[in-house]
Image (cartoon, rainbow, N blue to C red):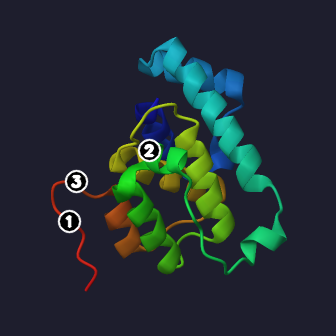
């Protein structure tokens, strides 16, 4: 599924440049993607688009602290939670976007979600909202996913 999401990100500059779901599914199949993966990716992306397009001004303006429940920590892992907090402190993600990233990660049904997959979720969220991360943040999101090297905070 993530190969398809990356393909869409790299192929279509904006989400509105994508063809309708039926035509897109045919194009993805013609490129060589599996029908089951195509269906999963399009369903996941449809849910993401629905969530990203919703207006929740009370959450967007939130300045509160986010506490994670045990189930979220189990699925996300400490590396992903740290990365989400980093993106939020860098003003790449708003509180609403953070919640969408968490929900879409939990929707994967795998535990723990790898940092590489979490980065793709963030890219797809920004892409679905027509936002492009700046060059340095893009490198951090799309760069090497070396989970062995700890992130330095200074």
Residue 93 to residue 120: above or below: below
Q: Where does residue 137 sit, x and y in percent of width and height?
A: 39, 71
Q: 93 or 123, which is in the foreground? A: 93
Q: Which mark is residue 83?
A: none
Residue occupying the point 49% across, 46% down: 9
Q: Where does residue 107 sit, x and y in percent of width and height?
A: 58, 36
Q: Earlier in the sequence, mark 1 or mark 2?
A: 2
Residue 74 to residue 81: above or below: above
Q: Earlier in the sequence, mark 2 or mark 3?
A: 2
Q: SS at mark 1? A: loop
Residue occupying the point 59% across, 68% down: 66
Determine which residue is flagged by label 3: 147
Determine which residue is flagged by label 2: 74
Instruction: Quarter of the image for the C terminus: give it.
Output: bottom left
Q: Assess disc 2: are there few (<14), some (14-19) or many (≥20) residues with their C-alpha within 10 Å of its C-alpha.
A: some
Q: Which mark is residue 150?
A: 1
């Amino acid at each position: 599924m993530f190969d398809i999401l990356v393909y869409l990100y790299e192929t279509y500059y904006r989400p509105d440049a994508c063809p309708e779901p039926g035509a897109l599914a045919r194009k993805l199949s013609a490129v060589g993607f599996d029908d089951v993966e195509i269906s999963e990716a399009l369903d996941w992306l449809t849910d993401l688009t629905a969530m990203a397009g919703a207006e929740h001004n009370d959450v967007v303006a939130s300045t509160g602290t986010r506490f994670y429940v045990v189930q979220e920590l189990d699925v996300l892992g400490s590396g992903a939670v740290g990365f989400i907090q980093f993106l939020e402190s860098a003003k790449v993600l708003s509180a609403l976007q953070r919640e969408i990233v968490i929900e879409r990660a939990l929707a994967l049904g795998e535990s723990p979600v790898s940092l590489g997959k979490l980065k793709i979720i963030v890219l797809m969220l920004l892409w679905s909202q027509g936002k492009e991360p700046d060059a340095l943040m893009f490198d951090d999101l799309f760069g090497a996913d070396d989970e062995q090297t700890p992130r330095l905070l200074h």
